Image (cartoon, grey):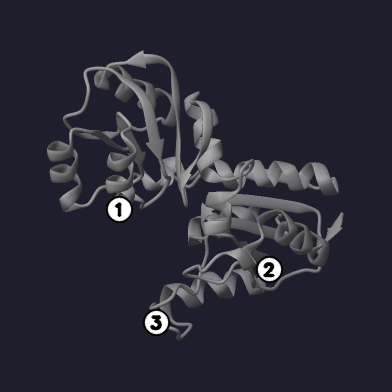
């Protein structure tokens, strides 16, 4: 058993949200029970995740994508009302960390994705953009199969890069906008979650492979890592619930 206050203090110490200008509040978003014995983690605080967490007897839900994003409607109506009502009715805390969870050198989505993909010497390249080396050179086709095997999702592959891929850059989620930085760094391939209309043209014209491996698929691992760390730190139960999302 742990207290909500101690968990939040630890998370803030680990993730340093004060160092980020984010698009949403990081930390506690909906207050529930002060005592926490069961933690559920997930990518997005959807109704499906909340319902599954309630069924699992969770006192706290920790996600990467929470609520109260800049520019979204503020009234608690419709879908947002239903989600928050479920949390309040069952006294469940909702905690969310966005950019701080992408960036962390150990628990972050970028570092965790590198471990899942077996990328050697993973390191920050520029801001949230990371780089590393493949353990062995691969053709684009072989690397696409590698991504599909590890992430259980067939990636979108566009562009016309080198015949073999050795050095890669990546940033999880909707980070296709960092593609020009990857081009400038001279890597063979860039991996992110999504693609926009200009992504194909940039990859083709700049001679780089781009792999859109899925926003959800690339961001499943940070919350799991930090959930396991909290379980070790406080002796609480932890369960990751994956509500599949093809995007």
Q: Give the mark, 3 or 2, whose residue is nearer the N terminus.
A: 3
User: Viewer-proximal residue, 94 or 132?
Assistant: 132
Q: What's the distance in space between the residues labelled 3 and 1, CA to CA? A: 25 Å
Residue positioned most to the top: 136
Under circle 1, the secondary element is: helix
Q: Is residue 213 above or below residue 69?
A: above
Residue 154 visible somewhere in the drawing = no
For the residues bearing labels 2 and 1, Cβ distance under 8 angstroms: no
| Figure label count | 3
User: Viewer-proximal residue, 218 or 47?
Assistant: 218
For label 2, count other residues whose C-alpha is less than 10 Å away and answer few (under 14), some (14-19) or many (20+). Answer: some
Name the residue that disc number 2 marks.
90
Q: Is residue 131 left or right of residue 1?
A: left
- Which label is found at residue 73? 3
The residue located at (42%, 44%) in the rendering is 171
- Which label is found at residue 177? 1
The residue located at (26%, 22%) in the rendering is 140
Residue positioned most to the bottom: 75
Q: Position of residue 52 (x, y in %)?
A: 58, 53
Q: Position of residue 17 (x, y in %)?
A: 62, 64
Q: Give the mark, 2 or 1, whose residue is nearer the N terminus.
A: 2
Residue 193 visible somewhere in the drawing = yes
Q: Is residue 6 above or below residue 155?
A: below
Q: What's the distance in space between the residues labelled 3 and 2, CA to CA? A: 25 Å
Under circle 2, the secondary element is: loop
Q: What's the distance in space between the residues labelled 2 and 1, CA to CA? A: 39 Å
Q: Nearer the viewer, mark 3 or mark 1?
A: 1
The residue located at (23%, 33%) in the rendering is 208
The residue located at (55%, 50%) in the rendering is 103
Q: Is residue 138 left or right of residue 123?
A: left
């Amino acid at each position: 058993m742990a207290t909500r206050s101690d968990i939040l203090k630890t998370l803030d110490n680990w993730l340093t949200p004060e160092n980020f200008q984010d698009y949403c509040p990081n930390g506690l978003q909906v207050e529930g029970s002060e005592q926490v014995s069961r933690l559920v983690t997930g990518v997005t605080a959807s109704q499906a995740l909340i319902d599954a967490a309630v069924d699992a007897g969770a006192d706290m839900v920790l996600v990467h994508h929470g609520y109260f994003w800049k520019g979204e409607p503020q009234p608690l109506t419709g879908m947002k009302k239903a989600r928050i009502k479920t949390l309040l009715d069952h006294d469940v805390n909702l905690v969310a960390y966005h950019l701080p969870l992408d960036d962390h050198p150990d628990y972050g989505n970028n570092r965790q994705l590198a471990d899942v993909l077996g990328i050697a010497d993973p390191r920050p390249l520029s801001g949230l953009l990371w780089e590393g080396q493949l353990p062995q050179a691969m053709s684009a086709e072989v690397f696409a199969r590698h991504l599909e095997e590890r992430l259980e999702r067939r990636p979108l592959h566009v562009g016309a890069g080198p015949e073999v891929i050795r050095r890669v850059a990546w940033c999880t989620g909707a980070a296709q906008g960092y593609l020009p930085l990857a081009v400038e760094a001279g890597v063979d391939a860039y991996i992110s979650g999504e693609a926009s209309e200009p992504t194909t043209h940039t990859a083709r014209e700049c001679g780089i492979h781009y792999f859109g491996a899925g926003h959800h698929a690339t961001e499943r691992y940070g919350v799991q890592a930090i959930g396991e760390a909290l379980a070790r730190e406080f002796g609480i139960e932890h369960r990751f619930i994956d509500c599949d999302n093809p995007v």
